[in-house]
Image: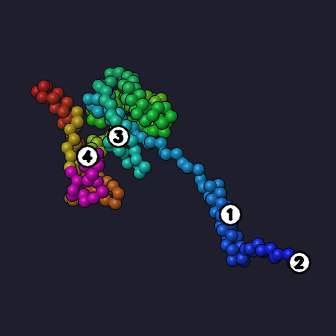
Amino acid sequence: MREPTKPLSPRPSRGRCRLCGLCLGSALLAIVVSTLVHLLSPPPQPAPSPRFSVIIDGGSTGTRAHVFSLGPDGRPDLARSAVMRVSPGLSSFAADTARAGESLRPLLEFAKEKVGGEGAAAATEVRLMATAGLRLLEEGVREAILVSCRNALRASGFRFEDSWAKVIPGSDEGIYAWIAANYALGTLGGDPHKTIGIIELGGASAQLTFVSDEVLPLELSTNFTFGETTYTLYSNSFLNFGQMQHKTHTIKY
């Protein structure tokens, strides 16, 4: 008697085999590519540390430390800046110049705290710009005060070079004030005629600065470029026309 025929097991078709092989190959390729991408990709970078700049303004009536937080493009974020003032001004140490540097210590401690301590201070530049109060002094006294200040700045833990502590000309003082005012107003980088002129009234001098189309004497003219725009500035300083000098002369006469 013939045995009943057993049903044959279905054999996979060649198309299905090719499909499975393709799926397996694709999965394997995806794993390999994923592994290579993981191995070859650079590790994630930590967020960049905040950058700062410290400017010490040595005025006639007081000294101020301005701590600016800088953005990725190097421009200061005015909303995050900090300032501290001490008095009297550097010119008051004319009779005891060695104490001028000591007067900067509270400002340097304040700045160090704002930038994040000793480590951050080592990467932060500090500059001293003295103005009309020191311009009124004799050259020898003026230089002795600067030497004292440079010694303090060199020992502060901030990045510093001796040439970064100086007395700036009155015309430069006016230009810096003009830049600061127009930067804050958002008028830099565009039409020069839409900028504002400034009269800066300090303790010992007054500065007048504005954009001019006229041909100016070289000593009163400066070209300043911001972005793609160049500004021709008239800047003049009037020594002894500051607020404190005005009061002194009023009382005297």
State the separation of the CA atoms marked 4 and 3: 17 Å
Q: Are marks 3 and 2 in contact (CB under 8 Å)?
A: no
The residue at which mark 2 appears reads as 1
The residue under the point 27% across, 52% down is 186
Name the disc covering residue 181, or none.
4
Task: Please report whichever mark, 1 or 2, sits nearer to the chain's N-terminal start.
Answer: 2
Under tag 2, what secondary structure?
loop
Q: Is residue 57 magenta?
A: no
Q: Is residue 194 magenta?
A: yes
Q: In this picture, is 236 found above or below 96?
A: below
Task: Give the residues drawn in magenta, as a range.
Answer: 180-196
The residue under the point 40% across, 44% down is 70
Task: Please report whichever mark, 3 or 2, sits nearer to the chain's N-terminal start.
Answer: 2
Answer with left or right where residue 145 lies relative to residue 119.
left
The residue at which mark 1 appears reads as 28
The residue at which mark 3 appears reads as 80
Task: Please report whichever mark, 4 or 1, sits nearer to the chain's N-terminal start.
Answer: 1
Q: Amino acid at mark 3?
A: Arg
* Quadrant of the image containing the C terminus: top left
